Image (cartoon, coloured by chain):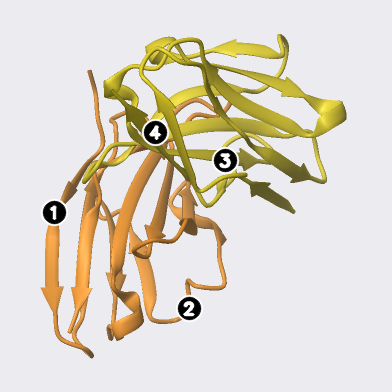
Chain colours: A orange, B yellow
Amino acid sequence: EPEVTQTPSHQVTQMGQEVILRCVPISNHLYFYWYRQILGQKVEFLVSFYNNEISEKSEIFDDQFSVERPDGSNFTLKIRSTKLEDSAMYFCASGGQASSYEQYFGPGTRLTVT
Amino acid sequence: AQSVTQLGSHVSVSEGALVLLRCNYSSSVPPYLFWYVQYPNQGLQLLLKYTTGATLVKGINGFEAEFKKSETSFHLTKPSAHMSDAAEYFCAVSGFGNEKLTFGTGTRLTIIP
């Protein structure tokens, strides 16, 4: 069964460093998303991406964040200068047909900023 | 704008007993509603969804949920709990199709042997 994959599973970085979180969505899906979950809190939307551009972003998704779909398979989230409060589990999700409404989530990348 | 309220951050039921996890939503447009399950150290797995049509929807692992517009609710039920149901459950809402999901705070389900 097709699934969303994410790498790495765990990333430790120092404050101020840049990180890139990688995702491979389900092939033939058209809609891509990033969410994050701070430990003990709810899952929060960061950004959605469709037709090679951002379709919506949350207040969390400030200038320190960017997304790219550099080729036909990968979808990346970059944080330019990490802060302690960026420590969280980051989930990638993808969705297929416009009428299916379902989002399929990857296993997540745990980002720890020290 | 959409929001979700999940009553009860922790729910414990005995094995074989009824599972009832509560979810109320707020939406300015007809909602699309979802339940996701998260097992320890894993991602989110879709249990079931409501988009349009039949208000009682069935999902995987014997779970079902009923959309009640008058009560703005989408409660998740399972007639008989199994040990493997122990996990965190999230209710989510979106507006139009393929829009962002807005999640509730989650309910941790514990099954008592």
Residue A53, how many percent across, how many down?
48, 56
Please say if A25 is above or below A76. above
Residue A89, quarter of the rendered image: bottom left
Q: Nearer the viewer, mark 4 or mark 3?
A: 4
Same subunit: marks 4 and 1: no
Which residue lies at the image location 51% right of the left edge and 31% below the top edge? B35
Q: Do we see residue A76 in this rendering?
A: yes
Q: Nearer the viewer, residue A100 or A38?
A: A38
**Nearer the viewer's eye, disc 4 or disc 2?**
4
Residue linked to disc 3: B92
Camera-nearest residue between B99 and A114: A114
Q: Name the residue under label 1.
A: A9
Secondary structure at numbered mark 4: strand
Q: Mark 2 points at which residue?
A: A62
- Counting residues from the start of the chain, the first of labels 4 and 3 encountered is 4
Q: In this rendering, which labeled residue sits more in front, label 1 or label 2?
A: 1
